[in-house]
Image (cartoon, rainbow, N blue to C red):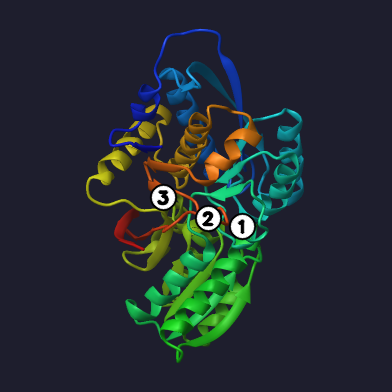
Amino acid sequence: MLFKTKFIPFAIAMAFAGSAGAQEVIKIGHVAPISGASAHLGKDNENGAKMAIEDLNAGGFKINGKVVKFVLLTEDDASDPKQGTAAAQKLVDAKVNGVIGHLNSGTTVPASKIYFDAGIPQISPSATTPQYTKQHFNTAFRVVANDNKLGGTLGRYAVDKLQAKRIAIIDDRTAYGQGVAEEFVKGAKAKFPGVQIVGKEFTNSNATDFNAILTAIKGKNPDLIFFGGMDAVGGPMLRQIKSLGMKVRFMGGDGICTESLAKLAGDGAGDGIVTCAEAGGVMGDQQKGMDDFHARYKKKYNSDVQLYAPNVYDAVMTMATAMADAKSAEPAKYLPYLAKVKYMGVTGPIAFDANGDIKDGSLTLFTFKGGKKTKMEVVK
């Protein structure tokens, strides 16, 4: 069943509008870091999930001819794998019908085994490590391109479009940071085997002082630094790059591709210095749906979308679509329908390959100008 959402948010909900009656309650779990350095991204995800749940309920969504009621059960994993598995078990014990999350690769992977053992479908809106779907858990799906696509595309873009020849690599030692950095190097070398990786350094996801590693890198005279990590680290790093007088481009994946990066970096994120990419991308007529979502989000929460809220919204709607197709919200019954679902969402078309990865995932490249995140182009 293919739903076209040319006018978000009510196209799906209105398609299932019907008379009120006895309502089946469907519990959707959501996990993200609501505390810690990435709390702003976790709250952004949670808001996207709330919007989807409210839209489904407002429109009288039907499954097998009956109006159902969705409820959202939220958990905080603080970007910590141990807390993530505890949150996953809590949702399993609550007998949720499905899970949207987690945000980070480092929490998504260990939690996915718990959901698989319980037979509960999981859609991550943001975890990009290839390991997540390489486990071949039939309950694991994602609505974003993985690191092979994300890092590889950025690597090719760095040498092809930015003409980078001497590149330094920094990662934060997380599953996401290491993974996207490794794929960046592969992509860069595949495009231009002669590119020089002049230095490889690492930090951690809570670091604030990068003087030592940046000084070491400065001496190697790179023309581009690729950082595998999140905006909470990338922003302060850019400030220190500026203070050291380094004239260098800065590149990263979706983890740094947020409005918050410019605030954290100050004048370190000067016009055109940063290039980043986020999963997904719409063009032409589909852009209106994305613009409408952003406007509605801003009106509702009095803040801009940080990063993944549209992906979370689509993940919830994709799961609901599979339930409607299966005429059941029981995990074992709708899981096969989720594997073959087709849904046109805010972020574009969603369908999954045999591993649970999104098919033909696109990426959107951004830079920053005047402290504002600015779209460059959509690439496949």
The residue at which mark 2 appears reads as 357
Q: Is residue 185 above or below residue 347?
A: below
Q: Amino acid at mark 1?
A: Thr
Q: Amino acid at mark 2?
A: Asp
Query: First in sequence: mark 2 or mark 3?
Result: 3
Residue 222 in view (yes/no) = no
Residue 203's quadrant in the figure? bottom right
What quarter of the picture does the N terminus occupy? top left
Q: Position of residue 146 (x, y in %)?
A: 52, 60
Marks 1 and 3: which is nearer the front?
1
Q: Which mark is residue 259?
A: 3
- Along the line of sight, which residue is nearer the eye, 255 or 362? 362
Q: Amino acid at mark 3?
A: Glu
| CA distance for labels 1 and 3 | 29 Å
Residue drawn at (27%, 45%) of the image = 286
Q: Is residue 87 above or below residue 261?
A: above
Query: First in sequence: mark 1 or mark 2?
Result: 1
| Crowd rating for badge 2 (residues with CA inside 10 Å; few <14, some 14–19, many 20+) | many
Q: Position of residue 239 (x, y in %)?
A: 48, 64
| CA distance for labels 2 and 3 | 27 Å
Q: Secondary structure at mark 1?
A: helix
Query: First in sequence: mark 1 or mark 3?
Result: 1
Q: Secondary structure at mark 3?
A: helix
The residue at which mark 1 appears reads as 133
